[in-house]
Amino acid sequence: MRFALKPGHVVLLLFFIAAALLPLFVDPRGHLLRVAAMALLFAAMAQSWNIIGGLANQISLGHAAFFGLGAYTSTLLFLRLGISPWIGMLAGAVVAGLAAALLSVPTFRLKGHYFALATLAFAEVLRVIANSWADLSGGPVGLTVPFLGTQPLSFAFRAVSSYYWIILALLVIVCVVFYVLAHGAMGYRLRAVRENEAAAEVAGVNTFRVKLVASVISAALTAMCGTVFAQFTFFFDPDSIFSLSGISVRMAMIAIVGGLGTLGGPIIGALFLIPLEEVANAYLSSRAAGLSQLVFGLILIAAILIQPRGIMAFFPKTKGKTQPKAQPATEGARG
Amino acid sequence: MTPTNSKVVLEAADICVTFGGLKAVDGVSFSLHQGEIAGLIGPNGAGKTTLFNALVGLQKLSGGAVRLDGETVSGLKPHRIATKGMTKTFQNAALFPDMSVLENVTTAALLRHDLKGARAKAAAVLAQLDLSPIADADVADLTFPQKAMVEMARALATEPRVVLLDEVMAALTPSEMDEVMDVIRALKGEGLTFLVVEHHMRAIMALCDRLIAVNFGRLIAAGTPAEVASHPTVIEAYLGHGAAGQEGSHA
């Protein structure tokens, strides 16, 4: 594969360098670094989602399922068996990958909204199971990751900056995976699936296999984000970790607002939406109940109306584009 | 004109496709010999596109079998059938709209090559069809004839033995049609086998070695273009009852 450094890649590289240096210049225990870490984590989550949601246009509204599986797998392995969350993170990726493969069989026949609803239902089912099967999951009270001070091998740190850098590293990994997939043979096939599934099949693309592989990779990376989230926040419960609005929709929303199917989209989307939400909460939540959500929602609607192709569409496009034209999630074979 | 000495590559045996209670294709049988260009004709709604979709695996058969080189391929997914050597073009060019011409063709070439090889193969196919100048163009910016040619290039990039062409010449001017027909004849010379759906009777008559006529999902005539075009049932299907005998020279 020919590699040419494009302006966009330089910008991305500079961003990663700047992001890596940020903890040196802000209060290491401050709120700002936590918000920045959360924004980067959501960027990584949205980028994971983007592999199947953006490249193949399979709009999943159930990625909280994989996020939660990652958090639960690593945390339960640590609490019950004393297995390091680092290993638990990989175990969670495997569990989520298997879950994605199983989910693929019934859902890949579905298109557009029906696919979105089926994935949504899957995450809801896991939420209900986690709430009711208390012997396994700890039930509705959730799980607490014990505070251990700084024990790197157990994925435990005192400093927020340590988690911040781990999250940044995860974001870089997810972005590299996305880039390699998007620009390799897989990327061609996924875009073909996105744009015309029937034509892709007839042109020799095994559409089921392509979607399956992308879905498994997407789920595994999302689960790794889930483990990091659990370690970073020290606590989660079924309703927050399998949350439709808090996780599933937010992942999709960040990628869509930033630019569906683009490398930079999830990062820009997360850097725009997560701080915006934070600011809206800080300034408006004390005024009236629901006001901050209302304002946040209005800004989202405005963003989508102003630029349906996402913030990335404002930037000049380089060749070898991977972004779809503004089109609804439903597509039909026009053959 | 039928090359009876060459072997049968595609055999359709008693193909049936049912939509609910409607028999869209009702027991159609025919076979294609290697290096032959056969035309599939019939009025609108006769079941031509449905039959094409059934052959390449996009449409489930409710009866019958499709055989490629004697091997049954019906029931396989379209990409498996493409691997076995049969693909089709789409009516109204179903290209991947957000990919360049080269990317469209490369995707199909990935069937038998890695990415590097697929790019080279795609470039070679584009060169063969004189499409190299538009290799980097956006599909959305192409003219109708260009889209049809890219659609054909994408089909050829799968390195098929049998290609089903669904109205690639619709919306072409007569001179553009001649160009496309020259390309198809050249590929036939390389041993490719074609089944062609086309509404332009001039193109069909000039291009095809043999015609297969269908109406209401049934095969109504097969033979040389002249035979089929003058077949009373075919004339009746196109022009209505009572037209046979008066308009025998047209179809």
Image (cartoon, coloured by chain):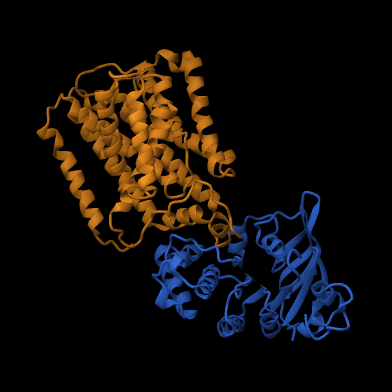
Q: Quadrant of residue A302?
A: top left
Horizontal and vertical percent position of residue B135: 41, 72
> Which quarter of the image is occupied by the N terminus of chain A?
bottom left
Residue B155: quadrant of the picture: bottom right
Q: Which residue is drawn at 37% across and 56% down?
A: A183
On the image, the x and y values in percent for residue A21 come to: 14, 39
Query: Chain A takes which shade in the image?
Result: orange
Based on the displayed image, in which of its 4 quarters is residue A172 positioned?
top left
For the question of whether residue B67 can be seen, the reply is yes
**Which sits in the foreground, B20 or B187?**
B20
Tell me what residue is drawn at x 30 percent, y 48 percent.
A264
Q: Can residue B85 be seen in this view?
A: no
Can you say whether A154 is above or below B227 in the image? above
Single out the residue that lies furthest toward the front. Answer: A287
Q: Total marks drawn?
A: 0
Could you say which chain is coloured blue in the image?
A: B
- From the viewer's perspective, tell me whether residue B100 is left or right of residue A124: left
Q: With respect to residue B56, does B162 lie above or below?
A: below
The quadrant in which the C terminus of chain A is found is bottom right
Relative to the observer, which residue lies in front, A270 or B152? A270
